[in-house]
Amino acid sequence: MNKLLVRRKKNTTTYRNLNKAKLVRGGTAYFDLLINLINQATESIHLQTYIFNDDLTGTMVAEALKNAAKRNVSVFLMADGYASQGMSKKFITDLVHTGVQFRFFEPFFKSKQFYFGRRMHHKVFVADARFALTGGINIADRYNDLPQYPAWTDFALYTEGEIAKDLCILCWKAWNGFPLKMGPTPCDDMKPAFDFKDAELSKLVMRRNDWIKRKNEISATYIDMFRHAKSHITIMCSYFLPGKAIRRALKNAAMRGVKIQVITAGTSDVMLSKYAERWMYDWLLRNKIELFEYQPTILHAKVSVCDSEWMTIGSYNINNLSAHASVELNIDVYNPGLAKQMEQIMKTIIDTDSIAITEKQHKQSTNIFKQFIRWSAYEIIRFMLFIVTFNLKERR
Protein backbone atom coordinates (compact mmCIF):
# COMPACT_ATOMS: atom_id res chain seq x y z
CA MET A 1 0.00 0.00 0.00
CA ASN A 2 1.16 3.55 -0.75
CA LYS A 3 3.07 5.04 2.23
CA LEU A 4 0.91 8.15 2.14
CA LEU A 5 -2.25 6.10 2.61
CA VAL A 6 -0.70 4.15 5.48
CA ARG A 7 0.40 7.37 7.17
CA ARG A 8 -3.02 8.99 6.67
CA LYS A 9 -4.77 5.98 8.23
CA LYS A 10 -2.52 6.20 11.28
CA ASN A 11 -3.45 9.89 11.52
CA THR A 12 -7.19 8.97 11.40
CA THR A 13 -7.67 10.63 8.00
CA THR A 14 -9.98 8.28 6.16
CA TYR A 15 -9.93 7.94 2.40
CA ARG A 16 -13.28 7.11 0.84
CA ASN A 17 -12.83 4.24 -1.59
CA LEU A 18 -16.18 4.08 -3.41
CA ASN A 19 -15.90 7.07 -5.77
CA LYS A 20 -15.56 8.08 -9.38
CA ALA A 21 -13.61 11.24 -10.15
CA LYS A 22 -13.01 13.34 -13.26
CA LEU A 23 -11.00 16.50 -13.94
CA VAL A 24 -13.00 19.42 -15.30
CA ARG A 25 -11.44 22.49 -16.87
CA GLY A 26 -13.01 25.86 -16.12
CA GLY A 27 -15.12 27.74 -18.61
CA THR A 28 -17.87 26.20 -20.73
CA ALA A 29 -17.06 22.62 -19.70
CA TYR A 30 -17.47 23.44 -16.01
CA PHE A 31 -20.66 25.49 -16.28
CA ASP A 32 -22.32 23.07 -18.70
CA LEU A 33 -21.68 20.26 -16.20
CA LEU A 34 -22.85 22.39 -13.25
CA ILE A 35 -26.14 23.27 -14.96
CA ASN A 36 -26.64 19.63 -15.97
CA LEU A 37 -26.13 18.45 -12.38
CA ILE A 38 -28.55 21.10 -11.07
CA ASN A 39 -31.14 19.96 -13.62
CA GLN A 40 -30.69 16.31 -12.57
CA ALA A 41 -31.04 16.90 -8.82
CA THR A 42 -34.13 15.34 -7.23
CA GLU A 43 -33.73 15.92 -3.46
CA SER A 44 -31.23 18.60 -2.42
CA ILE A 45 -28.65 21.05 -3.73
CA HIS A 46 -25.92 22.89 -1.83
CA LEU A 47 -23.90 25.55 -3.64
CA GLN A 48 -21.34 27.49 -1.60
CA THR A 49 -18.93 29.89 -3.25
CA TYR A 50 -16.70 32.86 -2.60
CA ILE A 51 -17.95 34.94 -5.54
CA PHE A 52 -21.47 34.83 -6.98
CA ASN A 53 -22.08 37.68 -9.41
CA ASP A 54 -25.44 38.59 -10.92
CA ASP A 55 -23.91 38.80 -14.41
CA LEU A 56 -24.72 36.54 -17.38
CA THR A 57 -23.11 33.46 -15.83
CA GLY A 58 -24.57 34.09 -12.38
CA THR A 59 -28.02 34.64 -13.87
CA MET A 60 -27.76 31.38 -15.83
CA VAL A 61 -26.86 29.43 -12.67
CA ALA A 62 -29.53 31.24 -10.65
CA GLU A 63 -32.21 30.32 -13.19
CA ALA A 64 -31.24 26.65 -12.95
CA LEU A 65 -31.37 26.84 -9.14
CA LYS A 66 -34.80 28.50 -9.23
CA ASN A 67 -36.10 25.82 -11.60
CA ALA A 68 -34.81 23.14 -9.23
CA ALA A 69 -36.64 24.82 -6.34
CA LYS A 70 -39.84 24.82 -8.42
CA ARG A 71 -39.41 21.02 -8.77
CA ASN A 72 -39.46 20.85 -4.94
CA VAL A 73 -35.73 20.26 -4.69
CA SER A 74 -34.35 21.77 -1.46
CA VAL A 75 -31.86 24.40 -2.67
CA PHE A 76 -29.34 26.09 -0.39
CA LEU A 77 -27.09 28.85 -1.77
CA MET A 78 -24.43 30.53 0.34
CA ALA A 79 -21.98 33.19 -0.86
CA ASP A 80 -19.21 35.06 0.92
CA GLY A 81 -20.55 38.29 2.38
CA TYR A 82 -17.57 40.34 1.23
CA ALA A 83 -16.71 38.95 -2.20
CA SER A 84 -20.36 38.63 -3.28
CA GLN A 85 -21.66 41.90 -1.87
CA GLY A 86 -22.27 43.16 -5.41
CA MET A 87 -25.33 40.90 -5.77
CA SER A 88 -28.35 43.18 -6.10
CA LYS A 89 -31.24 43.02 -3.64
CA LYS A 90 -33.62 42.27 -6.53
CA PHE A 91 -31.45 39.34 -7.65
CA ILE A 92 -31.47 37.87 -4.14
CA THR A 93 -35.18 38.56 -3.64
CA ASP A 94 -36.03 36.73 -6.87
CA LEU A 95 -34.04 33.72 -5.68
CA VAL A 96 -35.75 33.64 -2.29
CA HIS A 97 -39.27 34.18 -3.67
CA THR A 98 -38.77 31.22 -6.00
CA GLY A 99 -37.87 28.96 -3.08
CA VAL A 100 -34.06 29.11 -3.06
CA GLN A 101 -32.77 29.41 0.50
CA PHE A 102 -30.04 32.05 0.49
CA ARG A 103 -27.49 33.16 3.06
CA PHE A 104 -24.32 35.27 3.18
CA PHE A 105 -21.24 34.05 5.02
CA GLU A 106 -20.21 37.18 6.87
CA PRO A 107 -16.60 38.15 7.60
CA PHE A 108 -15.93 39.59 11.06
CA PHE A 109 -15.20 43.16 9.92
CA LYS A 110 -16.04 44.50 6.49
CA SER A 111 -16.97 47.51 4.42
CA LYS A 112 -17.37 47.99 0.71
CA GLN A 113 -13.64 48.70 0.43
CA PHE A 114 -12.04 46.12 2.73
CA TYR A 115 -12.53 43.43 5.33
CA PHE A 116 -10.51 41.84 8.09
CA GLY A 117 -10.81 38.28 9.20
CA ARG A 118 -12.16 34.95 8.12
CA ARG A 119 -13.75 34.54 4.72
CA MET A 120 -15.48 31.60 3.04
CA HIS A 121 -13.18 30.93 0.12
CA HIS A 122 -14.20 27.35 -0.65
CA LYS A 123 -16.19 26.48 -3.78
CA VAL A 124 -18.38 23.39 -3.55
CA PHE A 125 -21.53 22.06 -5.20
CA VAL A 126 -23.33 18.93 -3.98
CA ALA A 127 -26.51 17.35 -5.37
CA ASP A 128 -28.47 14.59 -3.58
CA ALA A 129 -25.40 13.68 -1.47
CA ARG A 130 -24.33 11.82 -4.62
CA PHE A 131 -22.67 14.20 -7.09
CA ALA A 132 -20.23 16.99 -6.31
CA LEU A 133 -17.98 19.61 -7.85
CA THR A 134 -15.07 21.16 -5.93
CA GLY A 135 -12.25 23.41 -7.07
CA GLY A 136 -11.33 27.04 -7.48
CA ILE A 137 -14.07 28.20 -9.86
CA ASN A 138 -16.43 30.98 -8.77
CA ILE A 139 -19.80 31.86 -10.30
CA ALA A 140 -19.00 34.85 -12.51
CA ASP A 141 -18.41 35.72 -16.15
CA ARG A 142 -14.63 35.80 -15.83
CA TYR A 143 -14.61 32.08 -14.98
CA ASN A 144 -16.76 31.26 -18.04
CA ASP A 145 -16.06 31.31 -21.78
CA LEU A 146 -17.85 34.25 -23.34
CA PRO A 147 -17.53 35.73 -26.85
CA GLN A 148 -14.09 37.38 -27.15
CA TYR A 149 -13.42 36.74 -23.43
CA PRO A 150 -11.94 33.31 -22.65
CA ALA A 151 -12.31 32.05 -19.10
CA TRP A 152 -9.57 32.40 -16.52
CA THR A 153 -7.67 29.11 -16.42
CA ASP A 154 -8.91 26.96 -13.58
CA PHE A 155 -9.79 23.36 -12.73
CA ALA A 156 -12.36 21.48 -10.68
CA LEU A 157 -12.93 17.88 -9.67
CA TYR A 158 -16.21 16.14 -10.44
CA THR A 159 -16.95 13.33 -8.01
CA GLU A 160 -19.68 10.78 -7.60
CA GLY A 161 -19.75 8.48 -4.61
CA GLU A 162 -19.11 8.40 -0.88
CA ILE A 163 -17.15 11.67 -0.83
CA ALA A 164 -20.28 13.57 -1.89
CA LYS A 165 -21.97 12.66 1.39
CA ASP A 166 -18.99 14.05 3.35
CA LEU A 167 -19.20 17.25 1.32
CA CYS A 168 -22.95 17.46 1.87
CA ILE A 169 -22.47 17.22 5.64
CA LEU A 170 -19.77 19.91 5.45
CA CYS A 171 -22.17 22.19 3.56
CA TRP A 172 -24.79 21.77 6.27
CA LYS A 173 -22.24 22.67 8.93
CA ALA A 174 -21.16 25.74 6.97
CA TRP A 175 -24.80 26.72 6.44
CA ASN A 176 -25.33 26.59 10.21
CA GLY A 177 -22.16 28.52 11.03
CA PHE A 178 -19.83 25.58 11.75
CA PRO A 179 -21.29 24.80 15.22
CA LEU A 180 -19.01 23.07 17.72
CA LYS A 181 -21.61 20.35 18.13
CA MET A 182 -24.25 19.39 15.61
CA GLY A 183 -26.60 16.45 15.47
CA PRO A 184 -27.29 14.36 12.37
CA THR A 185 -27.86 16.37 9.21
CA PRO A 186 -30.31 15.50 6.43
CA CYS A 187 -27.30 14.21 4.49
CA ASP A 188 -26.64 11.56 7.15
CA ASP A 189 -30.00 9.94 6.33
CA MET A 190 -29.34 9.83 2.58
CA LYS A 191 -27.93 6.50 1.45
CA PRO A 192 -27.46 6.53 -2.34
CA ALA A 193 -26.36 3.24 -3.87
CA PHE A 194 -23.32 3.09 -6.13
CA ASP A 195 -22.25 0.43 -8.59
CA PHE A 196 -18.81 1.36 -9.91
CA LYS A 197 -16.34 -0.82 -11.77
CA ASP A 198 -12.99 -1.34 -10.05
CA ALA A 199 -11.19 0.48 -12.87
CA GLU A 200 -13.30 3.60 -12.21
CA LEU A 201 -12.53 3.92 -8.50
CA SER A 202 -10.58 6.74 -6.87
CA LYS A 203 -9.52 7.07 -3.25
CA LEU A 204 -10.63 10.52 -2.11
CA VAL A 205 -10.50 12.47 1.13
CA MET A 206 -11.87 15.89 2.01
CA ARG A 207 -9.27 18.30 3.43
CA ARG A 208 -10.07 21.62 5.10
CA ASN A 209 -8.34 24.72 6.38
CA ASP A 210 -10.17 26.92 8.87
CA TRP A 211 -8.00 28.64 11.45
CA ILE A 212 -10.93 29.42 13.75
CA LYS A 213 -11.94 25.74 13.87
CA ARG A 214 -8.31 24.60 14.22
CA LYS A 215 -8.41 22.88 10.84
CA ASN A 216 -5.03 22.87 9.10
CA GLU A 217 -5.47 19.81 6.92
CA ILE A 218 -4.62 21.22 3.48
CA SER A 219 -1.44 22.81 4.76
CA ALA A 220 -0.57 19.40 6.24
CA THR A 221 -1.23 17.77 2.86
CA TYR A 222 1.36 20.04 1.24
CA ILE A 223 3.89 19.40 4.01
CA ASP A 224 3.30 15.64 3.48
CA MET A 225 3.79 16.07 -0.25
CA PHE A 226 7.10 17.90 0.09
CA ARG A 227 8.45 15.68 2.85
CA HIS A 228 7.67 12.34 1.22
CA ALA A 229 7.90 12.95 -2.55
CA LYS A 230 10.20 10.44 -4.22
CA SER A 231 10.90 12.03 -7.59
CA HIS A 232 8.85 15.04 -8.72
CA ILE A 233 6.12 17.55 -7.85
CA THR A 234 4.29 19.94 -10.16
CA ILE A 235 2.39 22.85 -8.63
CA MET A 236 -0.03 25.21 -10.35
CA CYS A 237 -0.99 28.10 -8.08
CA SER A 238 -2.44 31.51 -8.78
CA TYR A 239 -1.13 33.37 -5.72
CA PHE A 240 2.06 31.54 -4.74
CA LEU A 241 3.49 33.01 -1.54
CA PRO A 242 4.43 30.06 0.68
CA GLY A 243 4.94 30.68 4.39
CA LYS A 244 7.96 29.60 6.42
CA ALA A 245 6.90 26.01 7.07
CA ILE A 246 6.14 25.27 3.43
CA ARG A 247 9.28 27.09 2.23
CA ARG A 248 11.35 24.93 4.56
CA ALA A 249 9.67 21.75 3.27
CA LEU A 250 10.11 22.91 -0.35
CA LYS A 251 13.80 23.58 0.20
CA ASN A 252 14.38 20.23 1.89
CA ALA A 253 12.59 18.38 -0.92
CA ALA A 254 14.70 20.13 -3.56
CA MET A 255 17.89 19.33 -1.58
CA ARG A 256 16.86 15.63 -1.62
CA GLY A 257 16.79 15.78 -5.40
CA VAL A 258 13.02 16.06 -5.90
CA LYS A 259 12.28 17.93 -9.11
CA ILE A 260 9.83 20.75 -8.29
CA GLN A 261 8.08 22.79 -10.97
CA VAL A 262 5.85 25.75 -10.12
CA ILE A 263 3.46 27.36 -12.60
CA THR A 264 2.41 30.85 -11.53
CA ALA A 265 0.35 33.58 -13.15
CA GLY A 266 2.05 35.75 -15.74
CA THR A 267 -0.69 38.37 -15.45
CA SER A 268 -2.56 38.55 -12.16
CA ASP A 269 -5.84 40.14 -11.11
CA VAL A 270 -4.11 41.07 -7.84
CA MET A 271 -0.94 42.90 -8.89
CA LEU A 272 0.20 43.45 -5.30
CA SER A 273 0.34 39.66 -4.95
CA LYS A 274 2.20 39.30 -8.26
CA TYR A 275 4.86 41.84 -7.23
CA ALA A 276 5.27 39.98 -3.92
CA GLU A 277 5.59 36.67 -5.77
CA ARG A 278 8.36 38.06 -7.93
CA TRP A 279 10.21 39.18 -4.81
CA MET A 280 10.35 35.47 -3.87
CA TYR A 281 11.69 34.34 -7.26
CA ASP A 282 15.32 34.80 -6.13
CA TRP A 283 14.77 32.40 -3.23
CA LEU A 284 12.93 29.84 -5.36
CA LEU A 285 15.51 29.85 -8.16
CA ARG A 286 18.37 29.74 -5.67
CA ASN A 287 16.85 26.54 -4.27
CA LYS A 288 16.64 24.91 -7.72
CA ILE A 289 12.87 25.17 -8.03
CA GLU A 290 11.79 25.55 -11.67
CA LEU A 291 9.50 28.51 -12.35
CA PHE A 292 7.07 29.17 -15.18
CA GLU A 293 4.69 32.07 -15.80
CA TYR A 294 1.42 31.26 -17.56
CA GLN A 295 0.64 33.65 -20.45
CA PRO A 296 -2.69 33.20 -22.33
CA THR A 297 -5.05 34.50 -19.63
CA ILE A 298 -5.23 34.90 -15.85
CA LEU A 299 -4.27 31.71 -14.02
CA HIS A 300 -6.61 30.91 -11.12
CA ALA A 301 -5.94 27.17 -10.64
CA LYS A 302 -4.90 25.57 -7.33
CA VAL A 303 -3.67 22.02 -7.96
CA SER A 304 -0.54 19.99 -7.25
CA VAL A 305 0.55 16.49 -8.34
CA CYS A 306 3.16 14.28 -6.71
CA ASP A 307 5.12 11.36 -8.20
CA SER A 308 2.46 10.59 -10.85
CA GLU A 309 0.43 8.95 -8.06
CA TRP A 310 -1.64 11.46 -6.12
CA MET A 311 -2.82 15.04 -6.23
CA THR A 312 -4.63 17.74 -4.28
CA ILE A 313 -7.09 20.15 -5.89
CA GLY A 314 -9.43 22.80 -4.55
CA SER A 315 -9.65 26.39 -3.36
CA TYR A 316 -6.40 26.56 -1.34
CA ASN A 317 -3.66 28.86 -2.57
CA ILE A 318 -0.15 28.21 -1.22
CA ASN A 319 0.06 31.34 0.92
CA ASN A 320 -0.59 32.36 4.48
CA LEU A 321 -3.99 33.87 3.69
CA SER A 322 -5.31 30.43 2.75
CA ALA A 323 -3.37 28.84 5.61
CA HIS A 324 -4.49 31.19 8.39
CA ALA A 325 -7.45 33.35 7.40
CA SER A 326 -9.80 31.60 4.99
CA VAL A 327 -12.23 28.69 5.00
CA GLU A 328 -10.70 26.44 2.33
CA LEU A 329 -11.56 23.05 0.84
CA ASN A 330 -9.42 20.62 -1.17
CA ILE A 331 -9.85 17.03 -2.23
CA ASP A 332 -6.83 14.74 -2.02
CA VAL A 333 -6.98 12.16 -4.79
CA TYR A 334 -5.09 8.87 -4.87
CA ASN A 335 -5.50 7.66 -8.44
CA PRO A 336 -2.33 7.26 -10.55
CA GLY A 337 -4.33 7.46 -13.79
CA LEU A 338 -5.90 10.78 -12.85
CA ALA A 339 -2.60 12.09 -11.46
CA LYS A 340 -0.82 11.29 -14.73
CA GLN A 341 -3.62 12.98 -16.69
CA MET A 342 -3.21 16.16 -14.62
CA GLU A 343 0.57 16.00 -15.03
CA GLN A 344 0.17 15.80 -18.80
CA ILE A 345 -2.14 18.83 -18.77
CA MET A 346 0.43 20.74 -16.74
CA LYS A 347 3.27 19.65 -19.02
CA THR A 348 1.34 21.01 -22.01
CA ILE A 349 0.74 24.27 -20.15
CA ILE A 350 4.48 24.52 -19.40
CA ASP A 351 5.54 23.65 -22.96
CA THR A 352 3.05 25.73 -24.94
CA ASP A 353 1.50 28.39 -22.70
CA SER A 354 4.24 29.46 -20.29
CA ILE A 355 7.53 31.32 -20.14
CA ALA A 356 10.36 29.73 -18.17
CA ILE A 357 11.81 32.05 -15.51
CA THR A 358 15.53 31.25 -15.30
CA GLU A 359 18.10 32.87 -13.00
CA LYS A 360 19.67 34.61 -16.01
CA GLN A 361 16.35 35.86 -17.35
CA HIS A 362 15.19 36.99 -13.91
CA LYS A 363 18.39 38.98 -13.26
CA GLN A 364 18.18 40.64 -16.69
CA SER A 365 14.58 41.74 -16.04
CA THR A 366 15.31 43.10 -12.56
CA ASN A 367 16.58 46.45 -11.37
CA ILE A 368 16.78 48.26 -8.01
CA PHE A 369 13.48 50.07 -8.57
CA LYS A 370 11.59 46.87 -9.45
CA GLN A 371 13.09 45.03 -6.50
CA PHE A 372 12.05 47.84 -4.17
CA ILE A 373 8.45 47.65 -5.48
CA ARG A 374 8.43 43.85 -5.08
CA TRP A 375 9.92 43.98 -1.58
CA SER A 376 7.38 46.63 -0.59
CA ALA A 377 4.50 44.50 -1.90
CA TYR A 378 5.80 41.49 0.02
CA GLU A 379 6.07 43.46 3.27
CA ILE A 380 2.63 45.03 2.81
CA ILE A 381 1.07 41.60 2.38
CA ARG A 382 2.93 40.31 5.44
CA PHE A 383 1.63 43.24 7.50
CA MET A 384 -1.94 42.80 6.25
CA LEU A 385 -1.79 39.12 7.10
CA PHE A 386 -0.51 39.91 10.60
CA ILE A 387 -3.52 42.18 11.19
CA VAL A 388 -5.94 39.58 9.83
CA THR A 389 -4.55 36.66 11.82
CA PHE A 390 -4.22 38.75 14.97
CA ASN A 391 -7.95 39.51 14.84
CA LEU A 392 -8.73 35.85 14.22
CA LYS A 393 -6.57 34.64 17.11
CA GLU A 394 -8.24 37.14 19.42
CA ARG A 395 -11.60 35.59 18.53
CA ARG A 396 -10.60 31.94 18.95
Image (cartoon, helix red, strand yellow):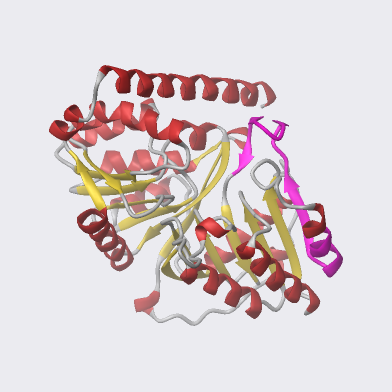
Q: Quadrant of residue 71?
A: bottom right
Q: x, y (%) of residue 346? A: 28, 57
Region of the chain picked out in magenta, as a range: 93-120
Give me the residue at 68% from left, 67% from top.
45
Quadrant showing the C terminus: top right
Q: Is residue 355 visible?
A: yes
Q: x, y (%) of residue 130? A: 59, 72
Give me the residue at 54% from left, 67% from top.
162
Q: x, y (%) of residue 235? A: 31, 47
Q: Is residue 62 left or right of residue 216?
A: right
Viewer-proximal residue among 275 and 78: 275
User: Where is 286 relative to 68, above or below?
Assistant: above
Viewer-proximal residue among 228 and 338: 338
Viewer-proximal residue among 343 and 353: 353
Give me the residue at 62% from left, 23% from top.
393
Give me the residue at 47% from left, 42% from top.
269
Q: Is residue 68 left or right of residue 55?
A: right
The residue most toward the front is: 148
User: Where is 175 relative to 290, above or below?
Assistant: below
